[in-house]
Amino acid sequence: MSTRNNGANHSEEVDLYSLINLIKRAFEKIGLIFLRFLNFLIRNIIVIALLIIIGLALAYFTKGEKGRLYQTEIIVATNFDGSVYLKKSLDEARFKLFSRNEEFLNKTALSEDIDKIASLKVEPIYRMNEYTNEQYNFMRYFEETKFLDDEEKAEAFKNNTTRYKVTLVHYLPLDSSNVLEKIIGYVRDNSFYTQLYDEYHQDVEMMLHSNIYMMKQLDSLVANYSKGMTLKKSRGQNTDYFNSENFIDLGVVLESRQLIQRDIKNLREEKIASSEFLRIIDKGGVSNYSGRNIFTNPMILYPILLVSGYFILLLLFIAVNKARKLD
């Protein structure tokens, strides 16, 4: 029994010793690889430095100021199915723009600006603080439904927004706001939505006038009620505040007035936004591009490409030499 336990302990000690040696050899190999790589850099430091300088010079002289990207953002108002139409139409406009579609460039007069445009994208703006209780309840029900997967729910939620941000990434000099207006003008050319928004604009005006009239009526009601109460008190008449003929719940009236006032504010905004299909409500301005990376910065991309190409050529040269030795 004791002999068996000693054998098991010895086996565990051997396995642990082997594991330690294995880890040690792995670290030694990693260190050796690092030293070889460092030695390679030292031997090729002049070539690598020259490639970096050539890459920087190439980026500077081929791009110049154009190598620096900027962005211009505008906000566009939509309604009904206008959000779906806006995204679809901007995707088509983007394709026509970068494929240099002659009809599109002639209609938008962007032939001279095409080389200064890097990208065009659109994304929804979520205004959660302006949603009504009914909209919140609908979104809660929509979130719990099992008829759609998460991707379809996200897409449907995006299509329900009424404000979109359109971003143009470009080089300077460029009248970017004018370019975006031309692109939106091209997308706006739709007789169905133009007529629909004209009808909707008239309905919004009618609802706005109705709400303003209703608020004036409430103000008049409260003013007359307060005046009547003051008059009764001045005559020394006892007032029965719970008499159904003269009692008004001022809390309900003031709450109703607050809701109508909020609706008036939203309707005024909607009236301006719906005055034109795909109305630009914020033209924005030029700012530094926030999504910059190595693929959009030639001053970084060109040196990396040249050095990487040099490494690939060396690896191919080494592989070819080893293949010849095998022969």
Image (cartoon, grey):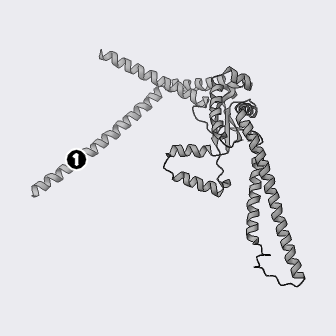
- The picture quadrant where one finds residue 321 is top left
Q: Which residue is mark 1?
A: 15
**Residue 62 x, y percent position in the rendering:** 65, 22
Q: Establish if 291 lies above or below 131.
A: above
Q: Quadrant of the rendered structure where residue 178 is?
A: top right
* Extreme residue in the front direction: 245
Q: Amino acid at mark 1?
A: Asp
Tell me if residue 111 can be seen: no
Q: Is 78 drawn above or below residue 308 in the view shown?
A: below
Q: Total marks drawn?
A: 1
Q: Residue 307: x percent and y percent?
A: 51, 26
Q: Residues within 10 Å of mark 1 (few under 14, many from 20)?
A: few
Q: Position of residue 184 (x, y in %)?
A: 71, 34
- Which element type, helix, strand or loop, lies under badge 1? helix
Quarter occupied by the C terminus:
top left
The location of residue 59, given as percent across then percent down, is 62, 25
**Which part of the image, by quadrant, shows the N terminus?**
bottom left
For residue 22, side relative to residue 116 (left or right): left
Nearer the observer, 32 or 208 = 208
Q: Residue at x 69, y 27 (%)?
A: 116
On the question of residue 252 being in view, the answer is: yes
Instruction: Indicate left or right for 145 with 186 as reference.
Output: left
Residue drawn at x 83%, y 72% is 225
